[in-house]
Amino acid sequence: MMFFRLFPATLILSLLTGVTSAATVVWHKTPLKIELVVGVEQMVVLPRDGAVGLPAELSNPNIFRTLVTGGTAYWTALEPFENKRIKVRLDSGEFILFDVSARTEKAPPAAMETVQIVLSSDSEATGDRVGQGGGPARASVFELIRYAAQAQYSPARLVAPVPGIRPVPVGLSGNLTQLYDQGRHRGLIVLPHKAWAVDGLYVTSFIVTNEHSHPITLDNRKVHHAPGAQRSGVAPHFVASAFFDTALSPRDTSKNRTTLFVVTDQPIRTVIRGI
């Protein structure tokens, strides 16, 4: 059994046209069935940091490919196969079991619905979206990033509400180019824009503009979460980060700008103050 390490603290979430589709599945000790479509990537968001273990049959990269980063597993089948058991060992010591199969479709979908795994204890603690004492459940990171993306890009009437969310001061200014590892080049402008808070979480949006004379593809793993952090390094108070769009056109074009969303458990100015 081969295990692949999941780097702690961040969840990389897809944001498509401001709305991301995700199915929430509760782990009740019964193996979770995941059916892949050959050639289409499946994203699985785990409830805790941990490691993914593959059976020998799926360790062949010509049959199955896995990328594990930022607390999320990306699975792609390259050939059809019957049920195979994948084990996920959480840092808490608990295992989550998946029975994964793959099928071929003549007209495969462009993308698969994201699967978000929730522990049964977490589900019971929140009363399946109702908190203790009858109050609302704590907002999820997914909901918070989705809200920020919709607030930035969609008409107000289309923004899905998050109970208790409120705008807060960003407390930062200037070009925070060090927030993204550009290597030897310095063609990106990263400007703090807006921030919101709810349930002890903060989401801050940054406008990212490409001033290069060539297109650029952004990589969420290059977001620097702390002073001196290595690529994919995270600070204790970073929770998640995501780009609205990763493909930027050259400067002076209509698509040379996107938004970076950063979720923290403290106001952003206290987390990246040293960057």
Image: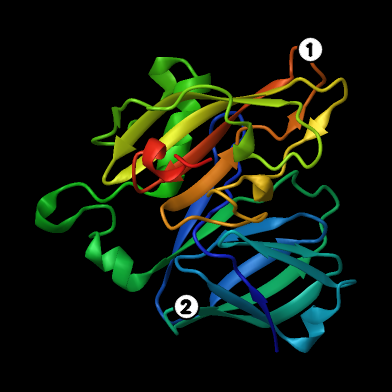
Task: Kindly tell me whether residue 160 is visible in this rendering.
Answer: no
Q: Amino acid at mark 2?
A: Asp
Q: Is 159 situated left or right of 127 in this image?
A: right
| Residue drawn at x 21%, y 47% as measured from the top left | 136
| Residue drawn at x 15%, y 48% as measured from the top left | 135
Q: Residues within 10 Å of mark 2 (few under 14, many from 20)?
A: few
Residue 151: x percent and y percent?
44, 23
| Residue drawn at x 71%, y 73% as measured from the top left | 101
Q: Amino acid at mark 1?
A: Thr
How many marks can you see?
2
Q: Which residue is mark 2?
A: 91
Mark 1: secondary structure: loop
Mark 2: secondary structure: loop
| Residue drawn at x 28%, y 46% as measured from the top left | 200
* Label disc, if present, on residue 134 of the rendered structure: none
Q: Nearer the viewer, residue 172 or 23?
A: 172
Picture quadrant of residue 78: bottom right
Q: Which residue is mark 1?
A: 253
Residue 8: x percent and y percent?
52, 64
Q: Nearer the viewer, residue 187 or 29?
A: 187
Q: Quadrant of the N terminus?
A: bottom right
Q: Earlier in the sequence, mark 2 or mark 1?
A: 2
Residue 247: x percent and y percent?
76, 31
